[in-house]
Structures are given as C-alpha cells and as structure tokens.
C-alpha cells in the first residue's frame, strides 16, 4: 500500500466518523466514487472503530506484567503458597489474609503458644524472568541471613510507635516475619476517609518523629516512609510499619548501576527498596540513587505530613515521571490554599522537611520533633496564628484558630503585630466599593477604561468574562478555545492577549479581537503570561524561568531575563524602558518582584534587602508612572517611584488593610481608582433540623457568628462576620440594631443576654489591650467595662440565673496567667470577686440555667467538666482530643459541646450523669467564623453553626495619590 | 554522580540538539538499566495491581540523567527514547516467553479484555510489533504515536509535546492507528496488502 492511499483512507475514515451513523454508508459510497477497494478498506476500519474500545488502552508493560503474573500464579498453584489459610506455620495458625502489597502478603494468625493474635508477613520470593541468572542456594541463604539480621535490628527498636517484630521464621523456604497485630487503619486510608484536623496531625507527627528519632539513633533508616507504612490504631496511636525492611545505615548497599548486574537477586529479596509504587515519597537524593542517610526519611515524612494537612501530594502531577521531576527540581505546591487552617508554623516545619538539599533540611528527627512539640505547646495557648495571610485563596473565610474555645490573650498580640504595619499617611485608599457579587472565583486580566476583563472559574471550569468598570454582572465572552487564559488587554483596547494552556506545558500566545473576528497566533511564541508595551508595539512574555521581549507580531523574540524558578506577570513601565515581573513559583510562598531593562537586560530584584520572602507579586505601574502597585502578604501596597535626583526607591506603603485580603491590583485608566480582587468572607448561620437531619439556613442569610438568644427566646444578639460588630434583633430578625461601632482589628466575642433581657455582656478584644468584659443596654447605649480595675485577661462571661452575679474565666492553655483559680464570680451589687474552688485547671465557664452548676473545659481542651455548687466538686463529663464551646440546654439537663479534632461533631452529655452522645456530625460541613467554628443553641435547643460562604469579588478602591 | 549519568545526560543533550547517532548510543545503555528494572518490577508486582509504565521509565530517568542539567525538551526526548526501548524489551520478553513455553502452554498476551471474552485468536505483542512496523512504513508518525502511547505509557498531551503537534492530531492518529492495527491483528484485512 502506498502512503498516499493510507492518507486517503484516513481522511475518509475520520470524515465518515463525523457523519451520523445512518448517513455514513451513503457518504462513503459517494466519496469513494466507485473505488470498491477503498470503500472496503475504510468500511473494515470503521468496523474496528466500533468494535472494541479497550484495544491498546492499557500500557504494554501492564499487559506484560499481567501475563507474567498469570504465569506465576499457574506455577505457584501447586507451590508453597497455594492456600495457607487454616494451616499452622511454626506455631502460628493462619486465620486470614489481611493485606498485601508490592513487598509481601500479610496474614492474621494466632500465636498458639501465647494465645495472642499476630500478623505474619511473607516476603515475596524472587521470580525469575527469562534470561536472568538462577539464584544460587548460597546466595539465597545469604539473603535470608541478611533478612534475619535486619528483622533483628528492627525488633531491637523497642518503641511504642514502631510496629513490634516478634519473630522471624521460614516456611517452605519462604521467610516470614511475625509482628504485633494492629487494629485500625493505615494513614493513607485515614487521610482518604477521615482527614485528621490540625491538632491530631500534630499529635501523630510527634509520634512518627519520635519513632524515627529512635530508629535513627540506632543507625537504622526506614527508607520507605509513606502513608501506607504508617498505621493509626483505633486508639489514635501511630505505628510505623515495615521497619523490618529498613537497612542499617552503615551497610547501605547501592543498588544502582548501569549494567543491571549489581541489582542481584539476593539484593532484591531483602531490599525491594526503591519500589516503583513509592516513587512519590522519595527524597531527591533517593530518586537520584545516592547514598541515603536519616535525613532522607525526614523528607519522606515531610511529604506524608503535607498529605495529612492537605489530602494532596506536594508535588502532584499527571504522571509519576513528572512527580519525580518535581521532587528533584520544583518547590512543593503551596499548602495554604488547600487548607487555610494550617498554622504558619506547621507549613514552616513541612517546608523545612521538604528542602531538596539535605544540608538545609531538618538535620535530625529529634530537631523536627522539637519543632512539632513546640507547635503543639503554643497552639494550646492559642498562639498559633493561622497563616492565612499568605495568599488570597488562603484567606477564604478569614479563618482564625479554632482550637481554643475561649478568647486567647494572643488575639491582642496578633492585633499589635498588625498595628506595626499600619499604613503611612499617603498615598492611601479612602473607599472600598465591591463591584461584583456573583460568588465565583475571579482573576483580573485588564481594562480598556470602560470595561474590565477577567477570568472567572467555578467547579473546575474557567472562562473569560467582561463587565463595566462601574460594576454589575460579568458576562461570559465567546472564545475560540476553552483553554485560553487571559493575560492582558491591548493599550488601544481592541484585543485580548491570551495563552493557550497545552497539557502541562506553556502554550501558544494568541491575540483575540474583542469585537469578534478570528484569533491570531502571535508568531510562534509560547508562554504562560505576558503584557503588551504601552505603545502596543512590543510584547513581554514569560516562558518557564525566562522573560522575553518580542515585537507584537511575534517577530524578533529575545530573552531579556532568566531567574531561578518561574517568571510571571510582566508589567511595562509607562515609558516602555523597564519591565518588572514576579519571580518564583506561582503557587509557592516566596515570590519576589524583579526589574529588568527592556533593551539591555540585567535583571535584579526590586527589593534586594528584604529580610524575608514577603510574597510580593503582580506589580503594575500607574499610567503616569508615579506609583508602582503590587500585592504583599494579602494586601495592596504602593511604592512611590523615584523621581529627579533621588534614584533610590522609596519604602513601599500598605494601601489596604482589614479583614478582607486583596490581590491583583490594577489602576483604572484615569488613575483615580484601583481595581483589586478581594476575598469576601461570609458566614451563613445554619441550624440543625433533626426532622430533616440537615443544617438549614435561617435568619434571612445574615453573615454572623455567636448567635445567642435572650432567656424568653424573643430576642437575639450576634456578631456580624467578618466585621466584628455587635447587633441585636428580635428572634425573627425584625428591629435590628447595631450596638457597637466597627473598630479596626477589634472583635467582640460571645455576647450574653442578662436574664431580664435588659443588657448584653460580651468580651472585647482590642489591639494593645487584654481581652475584657463589657456590657451595654440592649436598646443601645454606652458600653461599660465590667471589671475596670482588673489587670488580667477576662473572658467567657456567663450570668447567674438571677442576674446578680457574673461568672467569667481567664485564658486557656499555657497562656500567662496568675497562679490559682482561673474561674471567678463577681457580685454585681458589691463588686466583690470570689474564686470558683478547684478551677485552676479550667476555663470557659458556663452557668447552668437552673443556677446549680458550671460547665467548663480543662486547660488543654481535652475534657469537659461540671462544677456542682452544692458539693463544690468538679466532675468530668466527657473527654476527647479537642473539645470546645460548652453550651447548656435550656432545661439544664444536658451540656452540648463541639468535638473538634477527631470525628468532628456536635455532642451532648447528660447532667449530672450521662454518656456523651453524638447529636450531629460536622465532617461534611465547612464552617467559618472568628474561630473558624462555634456552637450555640436555638431556644428549642437546635445546634447553630456558621457555614463558610465566602467568595472572590472585584473591588474598586478609591485612593488618594498625592 | 556516576560517570554513566553524565554520559547519558550528554547523549540526551546531543540527541535533542539533532545528533541522531546519540540515540543509537543511548538506547543500549538505557536498555540495560530498564531491563533490570522491568524484571524487578514485574517480579514484585502482585497480580491485580495496577502498573504504571511511566513509573518505570521514570525510575530510569532519575537514575540515569543528571536532572540539574536537563531541560524539558530533553525529558520529552527521553520519554520518546524510553518508548522505543520499552518496545524492544517487551517484544523480546514476549518472544522469549513464547519460546520457553512451546507446546501451547503460553497464553497470548491479551491486548484487550474483549478479545479474551470473545475467545478470538490472541493478539500478541509480538504480532503487534510486526503490524506496527508495517504501519510505520506507511506513516511514521502514527507508528510513533502508538509507540509512545502504548509502549511508553505517555498521555496524549505528552505525545503531542514530543511530536511537536497538537493533541487533537495525536488523538486522530491514535484512533485511526488502533483501528488499523486491530484489523491487522484480527486477520480481517479487507484484502491482501
């Protein structure tokens, strides 16, 4: 057959497939024009197209391996392993097969001598592939001896977080290992089904680090730390598995080699070591086949920690080669957008574990354990700041740490830190106008002065849209391909610059006319971001770590800058002489602004002396060239451009502040406003309806936290979220009244109605002050401090049923506090303060409606206890990894509370003696609020929580630019 | 870094710069490594587990290539080279398997589940190799597409990147080539070619 003939066949084949089935035959007959051979050929091909869909769809290696496996099974049918269930191996009676993997099969067995359950693991024997040398008996014995030696080494690791190896043996020539039998699940299964929350992650991590420290101290490296090798028992204990396959550090054998001969059968028997399936957890040095040391385990542990915190792999990619390439070459994906609740310290620990250069990594498991323990201690005090300032996405819902159920003193400290970066007098933003409100994610692309062009995304799809600069609903623009990314708008407003995303690589650049007409490929340029020069004649674009400048038709492309990492978001100075761009991994924390001359190159960082990666990104000049606007740490900043003789750049000033994080700022054409994308926090108040077994919104969709009702159930009070102002209204939402004014960086927590409904008492946390109690009239009036003479943290106020006294607590965790009782009662008539006996270890008091008891939490939030005034005794009611927000039912017979870390749920326990019971699961609800989570009850004792309902919206910021 | 690693890196560099001889030198080197890996891999794999060709290729990649010195283009070329090597390994392996099991014991390597169910004559990798040679003679690009997709385990996008063409073109080639090969292997040729 001639190639031309094949091409003709192919053309007709595709053309016929494009026809509807009933038209196909007629079409072909006409197209073949009497050429019967051609017709038959094409028809026979079309028959194949319709017949099978699985043909060649599985990669060849899988096909081959399957065949091999089948052969093996046939051979083994009469062999040693045929069916071992029910047999007795040594003195172990095999009960069932419980699992297996690349390295062996695991059986549950009974130790007939000691009568305890054990796990038996058989190592898979080497199967000979054709042409490879037979394993000699001598080398087999040698391998077995090494296996025994290593199992002994592992069994010497007597550590609570390492699976114990009791014994080794041999059954019909196959070595096996006897291990303790564990009930629970692998960490992998846990991450997939019940992702642990932060405190549980930290707990497990400390255990794992402790186990690694013990192993490393004995010179043993695990070499295969991964979620399937960490077991979590039903009691929450971490157990590292497969330490028996670890190798003593000193005798590390190199199994690499170009001729393959060094990979001997004997080596394989005991060190499947670099197994294919675990490539994703390899350290860079392991991936390169280099000598390993304990620090390699710490890298793998870092990957595991990252997965625990996010559910995702830090170097995720479509195929294993790309994952390994990323492990070797690229920084991990930013963790925070995946889980904004991860505290900054934990991201730092993970980052340090994932350092590619092992000299820059944690040097020992002991060191890593210390950091984890410190994190655990500090989080108990509420000092752990959620590191949500790192990126826009990370600020979703403006989360605060939720693991303290009371107001931490550190709130004030955090606020003080904010004050340190308060904006300087000028330039400044004077007004914030939200101009979109459609609740989908957005990214700004450019403006022609009349319209804004943006990329919107929702549910995995993205599209280019336009809207009036004055605001309104963005409308979708038709594009030649859905894979276009909007980069820029041409200076004359006629065209959009778009990059076509091709698989995992940068794609071609296109110029798309805004008013219709066909898109034009810009030369053969390939890139990921770009911008037209102010005169529209040139184009700056980025491709991987390089910045190029070309003519706008794509000709004369030349490289002007190369940086480590990625280049993106280039911007031209108004005179067209300089280009500034962002360097760094787009999804990584450390981004920096760079500057380069458009003609002469010589790229250099814009702020070379910055002490810390400050996440600078996405800069753009105002059209008069006087200001350079950029994003830093989730807010918009401006730098006054050097003018005249003063060549040094001025210190940038922060333009925006407050609870809403902003990014992607862009001046309007007239320079009077700045457009920016803001992350709008919104919390929808929902209550659990037991009849429909669901949370349902009520209160007309207000965004609020700490909803609380007056004793008669007629009124409610709440704190607007995220503004932090106190409101009251009737229970049906009427007669709404704002009781406090918005104060920057200040928040009101947990308001409480006085029993007669005349006053509302709350905790106020302000910058520079300790959290204090204030009260004011429910009809409005001046706020008064309850305990002005107190120099301690006062919070969690709760009224006595007669309204004559107020009980309150001090801080929780390890926050500084005076010794002695931590819960006090003030008599509102005499102003005398008494201590609640035995309250040294409790905080967060709640007075029962019948006045007989107090409910409170233990300092470490692991226990809920009730104090009985009659007996003056505390009694423990419930335990857990992390409990919070105790709340009395209106009949005083139950205390509701939140179980936070493991199996999150609204719980309740009967008083005085009851068992904790689950009211409703919280694992499927994404909550928000000032602590990220809170609990209150309706007058009918239905649980109320706050559901996260945040979105990204465009803001037009008024600014004064002197 | 092993001397061999540098050598492979240099050869890849040379190959991506257009020196065809480099590929000839490269393939045997990669072959040795891949062969040992394939053996270990297949030997340790439990029946029923999902294999990833690319994982194997990659293991060779990270062992052989000084990754600091290579760029994306090299990787693409490396994958392409690995596809060729993988084809040789698997075809050789299938041949030796047939040879060692003369007398009808050896079940053919099933290229699709449907064929097993239908109890059709087994479409073997060895037969596929021959058919693929015939296809390549008529349309080399289609041969490459099949080689990379089936033997190399590359995705449509990756294949397109290596061949410097669009994913749509690769998809069309792939579709047509599969129909063509399946017809050849099922013995239903319209007429003798």
Image (cartoon, coloured by chain):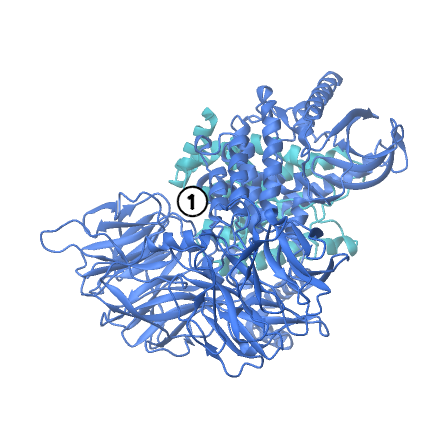
Task: Determine the residue located farthest toward the top in the rendered image.
Answer: A138
Among the chains, which one is cyan?
B
Task: Tell me the quarter of the image containing the C terminus of chain A.
Answer: bottom left
Camera sees residue A721: yes
Which chain letter goes with mark 1? B
**Between residues A407 and A592, which one lies in front from this camera angle?**
A407
Sort mark 1 into few (<14), some (14-19) or many (20+) by Cα contacts within 10 Å. few
Say which residue label 1 marks: B72
**What colour denotes chain A?**
blue
Q: Secondary structure at mark 1?
A: helix
Task: Tell me the quarter of the image containing the N terminus of chain A.
Answer: bottom right
**Between residues A16 and A551, which one lies in front from this camera angle?**
A551
Residue A370: x %, y % from top left? 52, 35
* Residue A906 drawn above or below residue A818: below
Report how many numbered discs are placed on residues in the image: 1
Residue A337: x %, y % from top left? 48, 55
**Between residues A931 and B174, which one lies in front from this camera angle?**
A931
Image position of A431 (left or right of A534): right
Image position of B49 (left or right of A385): right
Residue A374: x %, y % from top left? 51, 39
Residue A563: x %, y % from top left? 32, 44
Camera sees residue B190: no
Image position of A604 (left or right of A704): left
| Point 66% across, 67% down: residue | A849
Image position of A755 (left or right of A940): left
């Amino acid at each position: 057959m001639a190639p031309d003939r094949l091409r003709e066949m192919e053309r007709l084949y595709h053309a016929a497939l494009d026809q509807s089935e009933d038209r196909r035959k007629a079409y072909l007959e006409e197209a073949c024009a009497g050429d019967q051979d051609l017709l038959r050929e094409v028809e026979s091909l079309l028959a194949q197209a319709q017949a099978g869909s699985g043909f060649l769809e599985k990669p060849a290696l899988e096909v081959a391996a399957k065949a091999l496996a089948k052969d093996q099974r046939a051979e083994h049918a009469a062999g040693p392993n045929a069916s071992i269930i029910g047999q007795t191996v040594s003195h172990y009676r095999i009960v069932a097969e419980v699992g297996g993997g690349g390295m062996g099969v695991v059986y549950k067995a009974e130790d007939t001598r000691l009568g305890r359950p054990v796990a038996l693991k058989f190592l898979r024997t080497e199967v000979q592939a054709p042409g490879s040398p037979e394993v000699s008996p001598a080398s087999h014995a040698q391998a077995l001896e090494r296996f025994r030696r290593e199992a002994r080494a592992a069994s010497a690791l007597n550590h609570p977080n390492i699976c114990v190896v009791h014994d080794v043996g041999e059954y019909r020539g196959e070595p096996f290992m006897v291990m303790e039998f564990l009930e629970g699940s692998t960490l992998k299964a846990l991450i997939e089904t019940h992702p642990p929350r932060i405190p549980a992650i930290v707990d497990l991590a400390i255990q794992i680090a402790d186990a690694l420290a013990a192993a490393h101290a004995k010179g043993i490296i695990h070499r295969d730390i991964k979620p399937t090798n960490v077991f979590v028992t039903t009691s929450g204990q971490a157990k590292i598995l497969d330490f028996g396959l670890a190798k003593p550090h000193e005798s590390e054998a190199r199994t690499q080699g170009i001729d393959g001969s060094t990979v001997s059968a004997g080596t394989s028997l005991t060190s499947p070591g670099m197994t294919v399936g675990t490539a994703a957890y390899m350290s860079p040095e392991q991936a390169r086949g280099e000598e390993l040391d304990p620090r390699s385990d710490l890298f793998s542990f870092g990957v595991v920690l990252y997965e625990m915190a996010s559910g995702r792999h830090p170097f995720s990619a479509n195929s294993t080669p790309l994952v390994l390439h990323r492990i070797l070459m690229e920084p991990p994906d930013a963790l925070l957008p995946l889980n904004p609740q991860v505290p900054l310290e934990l991201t730092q620990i993970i980052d340090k574990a994932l350092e590619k250069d092992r000299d820059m990594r944690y040097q020992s498991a002991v060191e890593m354990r210390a950091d984890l323990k410190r994190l655990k201690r500090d989080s108990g005090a509420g000092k752990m700041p959620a590191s949500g300032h790192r990126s826009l996405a990370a600020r979703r819902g403006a989360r605060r740490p939720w693991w303290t159920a009371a107001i931490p003193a550190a709130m004030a400290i955090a606020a003080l830190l904010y004050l340190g970066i308060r904006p300087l007098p000028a330039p400044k933003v004077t007004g914030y106008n939200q101009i979109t409100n459609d609740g989908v994610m957005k990214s700004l692309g450019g403006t022609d002065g009349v319209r804004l062009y943006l990329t919107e995304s929702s549910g995995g799809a993205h599209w280019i849209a336009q809207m009036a600069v004055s605001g309104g609903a963005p409308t979708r623009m038709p594009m030649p391909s859905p894979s276009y990314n909007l980069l820029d708008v041409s200076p004359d407003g006629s065209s959009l610059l778009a990059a076509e995303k091709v698989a995992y690589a940068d794609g071609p650049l296109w110029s798309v006319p805004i008013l219709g007409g066909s898109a034009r490929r810009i030369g053969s340029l390939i890139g990921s971001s770009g911008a037209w020069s102010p005169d529209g004649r040139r184009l700056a674009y980025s491709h991987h770590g390089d910045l190029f400048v070309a003519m706008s038709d794509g000709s004369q492309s030349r490289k002007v800058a190369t940086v480590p990492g990625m280049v993106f978001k280039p911007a031209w100075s108004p005179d067209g002489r300089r280009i500034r761009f962002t360097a760094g991994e787009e999804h990584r924390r450390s981004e920096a602004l760079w500057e380069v001359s458009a003609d002469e190159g010589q790229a250099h960082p814009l702020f070379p002396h910055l002490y810390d990666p400050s996440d600078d990104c996405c800069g753009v000049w105002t059209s008069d060239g006087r200001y350079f606007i950029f994003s830093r740490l989730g807010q918009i900043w401006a730098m006054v451009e050097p003018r005249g003789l003063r060549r040094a750049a001025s210190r940038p000033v922060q333009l925006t502040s407050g609870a809403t994080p902003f990014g992607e700022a862009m001046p309007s054409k007239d320079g009077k406003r700045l457009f920016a994308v803001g992350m709008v926090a919104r919390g929808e108040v929902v209550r659990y309806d037991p009849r429909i077994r669901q949370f349902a919104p009520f209160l007309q969709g207000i965004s609020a936290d700490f909803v609380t009702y007056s004793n008669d159930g007629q009124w409610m009070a709440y704190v607007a979220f995220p503004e932090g102002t106190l409101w009251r209204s009737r229970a049906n939402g009427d007669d709404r009244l704002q009781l406090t004014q918005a104060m920057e960086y200040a928040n009101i927590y947990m308001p409480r109605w006085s029993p007669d409904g005349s006053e509302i008492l709350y905790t106020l946390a302000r910058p520079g002050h300790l959290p204090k109690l204030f009260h004011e009239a429910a009809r409005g009036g001046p706020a008064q401090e309850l305990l002005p003479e107190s120099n301690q943290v006062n919070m969690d106020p709760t009224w006595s049923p007669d309204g004559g006294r107020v009980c309150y607590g001090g801080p929780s965790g390890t926050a500084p506090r005076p010794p002695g009782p931590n819960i006090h009662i003030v008599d509102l008539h005499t102003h005398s303060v008494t201590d609640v006996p035995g309250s040294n270890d409790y905080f967060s008091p709640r007075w029962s409606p019948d006045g007989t008891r107090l409910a409170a939490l233990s300092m470490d939030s692991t226990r809920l206890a009730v104090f009985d005034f009659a007996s003056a005794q505390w009694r423990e009611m419930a335990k857990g990894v992390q409990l919070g927000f105790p709340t009395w039912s209106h009949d005083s017979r139950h205390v509701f509370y939140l179980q936070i870390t493991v199996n999150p749920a609204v719980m309740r326990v009967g008083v005085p003696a009851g068992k904790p019971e689950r009211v409703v699961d919280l694992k499927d609800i994404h909550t928000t609020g000032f602590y990220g989570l809170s609990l209150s009850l309706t007058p009918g004792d239905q649980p109320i929580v706050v559901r996260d309902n945040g979105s990204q919206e465009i803001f037009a910021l008024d600014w004064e630019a002197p | 870094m092993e001397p061999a690693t540098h050598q492979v890196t240099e050869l890849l560099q040379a190959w991506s710069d257009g020196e065809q001889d480099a590929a000839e030198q490269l393939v045997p080197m990669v072959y040795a490594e891949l062969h040992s890996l394939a053996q270990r891999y297949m030997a340790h794999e439990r029946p029923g587990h999902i294999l990833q060709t690319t994982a194997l290729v990659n293991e060779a990649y990270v062992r052989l290539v000084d990754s600091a010195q290579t760029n994306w283009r090299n990787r693409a070329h490396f994958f392409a080279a690995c596809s060729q090597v993988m084809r040789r390994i698997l075809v050789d392996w299938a041949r030796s398997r047939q040879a060692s099991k003369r007398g009808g014991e050896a079940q053919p390597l099933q290229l699709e589940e449907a064929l097993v169910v239908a109890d059709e004559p087994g479409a073997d990798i060895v037969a596929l190799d021959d058919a693929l040679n015939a296809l390549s003679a008529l349309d080399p690009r289609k041969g490459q597409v099949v080689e990379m997709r089936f033997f190399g385990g590359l995705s449509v996008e990756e294949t397109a990147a290596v061949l410097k063409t669009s994913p749509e073109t690769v998809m069309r080639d792939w579709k047509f080539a599969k129909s063509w090969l399946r017809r050849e292997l099922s013995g239903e040729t319209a007429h003798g070619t």
